[in-house]
Image: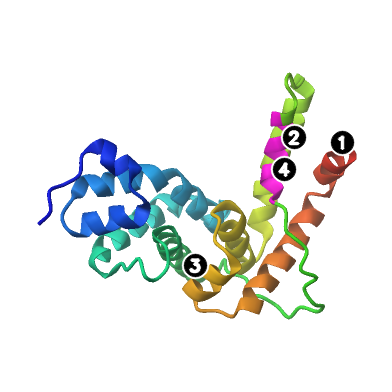
Amino acid sequence: MPAPADADDHHAMPDDQLMLAYAQGDTAAFDTLYARHEGALFRFVRRLLGARLAAQADEVFQDTWLRIVSARESFSPQGASWRTWAFTIAHNLAMDRLRVSGREVPLGAHAGDDDGEAVPTLERGVRGAVDAAAHPSAEELAFWRAAGRRLLGCLDELPAEQRAAFLLHHEDGLTVEAMAQSLGIGFETVRSRLRYGLQKLRACMARYLAVLEGGR
């Protein structure tokens, strides 16, 4: 068994190498992985489950890490990246919980073709509007905090598949190709979920987006 790397080496190692080191018995490598992705994974699980199942987020989050631990020897960097692999595990567990609860809403039939337009990240726009102001007023801060709360509410109203696609793509950086491959669904299906989910979010966030676009 190779000697474990020191802490500085761990922090410099990419996720895939950390997982391989952990599979070979380097438990400190897992600690680094956990610290690196704990917040993002929990946020993804919490937002995918939505307000109604928020109390179950901790359990699904812990189940995700248990699955990661139990599958450590099967992880292959020749397949999906560690982040894609881990978020797919979280996605599947959360979707299973949604199905059991009856919260999942099937993706309906859609009309129209994808126009290929780049999809903006709504939440990043909300944050950016605050960051762009060197000294935002109390009124501005209150407005954009309300926008952030509204966005979370809008996400909760999406069908589960569309919400998951939006979060995986815009919040966690998975490409459409990676989502299609890791989730075992068609490329066009993923694009449709992203497109129609974004349309619903834009309609739900119309008031706040009008302010953003009016300030350009």
Disc 1 marks which residue? 215
Q: CA distance from mark 2 to mark 3?
A: 32 Å
Neighbour class for label 2 at 10 Å: few (<14), some, many (≥20)? Answer: some
The label shown at residue 7 is none
Q: CA distance from mark 2 to mark 4?
A: 6 Å
Which stretch appears magenta?
Answer: 121-131
Q: Which one is in front, 54 or 114?
A: 114
What amino acid is at disc 3? Met
Neighbour class for label 1 at 10 Å: few (<14), some, many (≥20)? Answer: few
The label shown at residue 95 is 3
Q: Is residue 22 left or right of residue 35?
A: left
Question: From the viewer's perspective, is the residue at label 3 or at label 4 nearer?
Answer: 4
Q: Quadrant of residue 142?
A: top right
Q: CA distance from mark 2 to mark 1?
A: 9 Å
Q: Is residue 54 left or right of residue 143?
A: left
Are circles 1 and 4 on residues that touch, CB within 8 Å?
A: no
Question: From the viewer's perspective, is the residue at label 2 or at label 3 nearer?
Answer: 2
Pointer 2 or 1: first along the chain: 2
Disc 2 marks which residue? 129
Neighbour class for label 3 at 10 Å: few (<14), some, many (≥20)? Answer: many
Residue ID at (74%, 34%): 129
Question: From the viewer's perspective, is the residue at label 1 or at label 3 nearer?
Answer: 1
- Magenta stretch: includes residue 129: yes
| Residue 106 appearing in the image | no
Are circles 2 and 4 on residues that touch, CB within 8 Å?
A: yes
Q: Position of residue 40 (x, y in %)?
A: 47, 47
Q: Quadrant of residue 199?
A: bottom right
Q: Is residue 144 left or right of residue 49?
A: right
Per the image, label 1 sits on a secondary structure element best described as loop
Neighbour class for label 4 at 10 Å: few (<14), some, many (≥20)? Answer: some
Question: How many tags in the picture?
Answer: 4
